[in-house]
Amino acid sequence: MRQDNNNDNNGGASGRFRRGGSRSGGRRYAADNARAEYRRYPTDFDNDTERYEYYDHTPGRYEPYDSNAAHSAYYDSSAGVSASHDGGERGDYASYYRRNAYLRGAEVSGDDDDDIDYFNAIDDEREKTRPTPDQPVGIGAVVGGLASSWWQRYLHYYRRSRIRGIGTVGIVLCLCVSLVLTFRFSPTDYMAIIKEWLHPKTNAADKAETVSAEEPESGFNVTVKFTTGTICSEPDFSKKIQNTVMKGQVFEVLETSGDFYRIEYLKNCFGWIDKYYVDVEGHEEPKVIDPHHPEELTGNTATELKNICQKYSAMGVGVAVIKDGKVEYTYSYGYANRQQKKKINADTKFRPASLSKIISTLSTMTLVDAGRIDLDRNVENYFGFKFRNPLFPQSEITPRMLLNHSSSLDDEYIIYTGSNAGTRLKDLVIDLKSYKDQKPGTEFSYSNSGFGIVGSLDEVVTNMHYIYFTDSVLFDRLGMDAAFGGQSLQDKTNVAECYKIDKVSRSRAVLVKDRQIRAPGETYILAQGSLLISPKDYAKLVTIFVNDGMYGNIRVLSEAAVREVEKEYLHDDQFRYCLGFKKTNAYVDGHDLYYHGGNAYGVYASVCYDEQQKSGVVVMTSGAYGSVDDYHFYKVCQTITQQCYKDLIDK
């Protein structure tokens, strides 16, 4: 009968090291070769210490070291680390101990840094020899070993010579097959075989479809497509450096890593640029073909609109009408500068106040499409500092809440108080005065401050000033003379002054002056209402929503992004609230419209569109009477819009 050679925990083990259950620890039989090493295992459970013992593998010798012996050392998790040795033939003991302590992150006494380097070098060599997924490894050996083990177990019960002979032949065959498999295939090859077996291709043409033309790693050119492109010291957007590159510059890609290209941006200066900032040579966006060719209104409709403008004593008015997804008509009335007798025309730029929020929504959604912004992610993850309503410290604030006015941020405090004082955003968003007493995400509460911070969010994720960012993704890209700051305007002369009744409240010189360029993330005073644009160009941007994200021959937004903007999140008795827009059927009879209004410095403006009919109207006025109805619609804008729908869209 077969005898089991295994011993208990206090004795030796059959040719292998065993951990002991007693305080004396385990035992190990001597190896054939003479060498020594140190093993670590718990020996004092009460004091939470660990004992290091010396094992001499010279045949016939085993010598455990007592806790009081001269060569023993301890690691005490509560008291720190100590080590000592007296040199001699076992002087390497301290080196081994120091290496273990070093790997734990503990402070190591002595001056055996060379020993630590030695062991680290060994680890490096082991890492180099670790097989990669593309190297043939012993998968076949595993198969052969399992087969051999099975035959041995089988023959243990059936000892007849014939069966034993068959078993021997089977083992030999399994080993031969395992050797072939070992040196023929890598793990990657096995995965390809399994995939082909699970999803077979019927012919060569089908197989060819699975082969994709991967982007080369280097040796091709890229063109910077944004006004400024950020350079990083590593392929990580958090490793930004001060150097930037300008729109139109061309660079050769030296290396690719994830979403980054390595380039030589200056002579002998190398860095990484995010793919978001560049176009690959041969894959550039096509030149925009403007699909809009509006005509200036004349005749009866122009007469009706003139009468409305005079009724409300407007100083100047600009109108653009969208029909069948295109800007079909424009209308101009009055003066951009009454003193100089300069008249409004189709290209005259207004400051349409809060209509800016719709364009801010549009530009932000391009970052959502690019994967830079997650609408439902905590904004603290983008800004890197605490951003909570102190009254509801457990509630996160997200980009979606900023865009649909449910963030609980106060309407004006950050914009009008914080910006005047030059306070940093990180200090403003923890100030109780910056918030209302409402839980974020639960109800609509109009907030200029919230939309101003949308601009800061765009800056943080692109590392670009908001003026340059919107120039790059919208205005320059689509060939429009519009901007959130005067320094980006091409024609600064054709800008309407802001009138309150018959007095200038905001001169052209003030409107077109250069904006201060703050650090990215600190420009929280533009996105809510500082846009300068003509009604015609504004209407062109609105058609991006009307046409499911397309502008002529290029796609600005995905259809999914447009659906996110138009989705109704909150509602009350008057409106249904979306991202940027409100939705109402009270503005124009018979139409359920996406709507927004604007009012500042005597300017009254409105935008609306019907997604089903692919129609809309943009109105910008200056100096008109600011009467409103129960829905807070500006009567001058609503009356003009209703007239346009009646005469130009619905007839």
Image: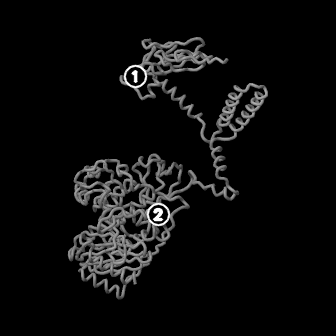
Q: Nearer the viewer, residue 641 or 237?
A: 641
Q: Nearer the viewer, residue 108 or 199?
A: 199
The residue identified by callout 1 is 48
Which percent across, then down, holds residue 376?
Answer: 39, 54
CB-based contact (under 8 Å), mark 2 and mark 1:
no
Q: Quarter of the image holding residue 357?
A: bottom left
Decide: is 390 above or below 509: above
Which percent across, then down, holds residue 143?
Answer: 67, 35
Number of marks in picture: 2
Q: Nearer the viewer, residue 419 or 61?
A: 61
Decide: is 313 above or below 373: below
Q: Secondary structure at mark 1?
A: loop
Mark 1, Cα crowd under 10 Å, few <14 / some 14-19 / many 20+, is few
Decide: is 80 above or below 445: above
Decide: is 204 above or below 640: above
Which percent across, then down, holds residue 5?
Answer: 61, 17
Does the rendering let one see residue 109?
no
The residue identified by callout 2 is 558
